[in-house]
Amino acid sequence: MPKRPNLGRVGAGALMAVAVLALAGAMADSSAAPFRAQLDFVPAHNGVSLTTTRPAGPALTDEARPMVPMGRGAIHVPIVMYHYIRVNPVPGDQLGFNLSVTPDNFNQQMDWLKTNGYHPIDFDDLRAYFLGQSPLPARPVILTFDDGYRDLYTTAYPVLRAHNFKAVAYLVSGFLDAPNNVTREQVVEMDAHGIQVGAHTYSHVDLTKTANAELTRQLVDSRTDLEHLVGHPVVDFCYPAGRFDGRVISAVQAAGYQTATTTQPGTQHSVADRFTWTRVRVSGGEGLDRFAADLSPQEPTVVMKVSAQPRVPVIPRLTLVYPLELPRVVLEQAVELRPLP
């Protein structure tokens, strides 16, 4: 496999500049102060500036098949949320049970996706679709794994590779190499074999309760650490415990992220709500009937011929608008509040 370009130093320099801007906007340094860091992004609809996140994949086959055609402003793409892939070690721990999908159940779920024509994609694929660069395969789905527990590598990763599935790992960079978490070497290996790396802060704090300086550190340090590790941009983020507000979203934008996911339920996504994308939670003990129902509805497809051209995953440079208006979603209390090790 070709070696990825080392973009760590470039990314670090850019992020240091972001940190300076963010801190300048947080002079009061309190969680109540508005976050006003601003970046000069180019609008996506006019003179888009693109950044390559990964090397180009293999050329697509030149054949007619069901696809999600380009041009739709909002599409149904379930973003599935996993935490542990394990047998819960403490039977009386209900929260641990809810966050744990057993290896057998996980394998059955991946088998079901394969059998029923689902195609796991990642956020580069979804960005390319919204930029009008590439259609999506029929029944697209994004598999995400929060927190970076060790069983992501030891249990989930081999199953994903056996099914030839892509996935996304949201990693808490400060917990890498901890006893119950993935190691840096494992992250590099997974990143090279279809597991896209996203950020989940530096130490899994409640960002809505953090002062501006610490908010910036959690976002920038996590992205910088992960970019140094994998050698390419990391632009996808996940709010710890699903907690966010307008100030947090503004800080995520200013830190250079291009998407952010929540713990709120839903499957329809657009560019407009890219910092509050909803997900489908998979709970412990969940049967296949419930798993299948939560992935509905499927995005309609058309049979089309895909040109055999390689696609380079890209990320758009999008306009930041202040003050930010939250979409009409209910900011529910997150169910997983367990502090990570």
Image (cartoon, rainbow, N blue to C red):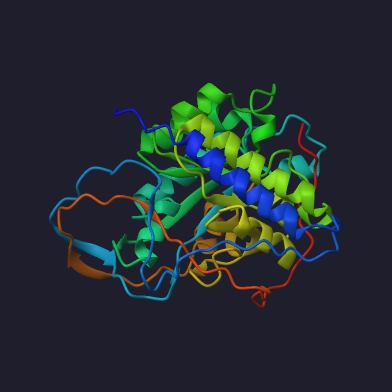
Q: Nearer the viewer, residue 203 or 117?
A: 203
The quadrant in which residue 127 appears is bottom left
Residue drawn at x 86%, y 58% is 28
Residue drawn at x 20%, y 61% is 65
Give the residue at the far left of this rendering. 62
Measured as percent of width and height from the top left, residue 228 is found at 53, 32
Horizontal relation, residue 28 to residue 199: left or right: right
State the quadrant of the N terminus.
Answer: top left
Residue 206 in view here: no
Measured as percent of width and height from the top left, residue 299 is found at 39, 70
State the quadrant of the C terminus.
Answer: top right
Query: Is the residue 87 above or below the residue 43 in the image?
Result: above
Query: Is the residue 200 above or below the residue 183 in the image?
Result: below
Query: Is the residue 320 above or below the residue 237 in the image?
Result: below
Query: Is the residue 179 above or below the residue 65 in the image?
Result: above
Horizontal relation, residue 31 to residue 43: left or right: right
The quadrant in which residue 21 appears is bottom right
Measured as percent of width and height from the top left, residue 117 is found at 33, 55
The quadrant in which residue 27 appears is bottom right
Residue drawn at x 48%, y 46% is 109
Q: Nearer the viewer, residue 223 or 121?
A: 223
Residue drawn at x 42%, y 76% is 73
Residue 24 in view here: yes
Q: Nearer the viewer, residue 277 or 55?
A: 55
Measured as percent of width and height from the top left, residue 283 is found at 65, 49
Q: Nearer the viewer, residue 167 or 295?
A: 167
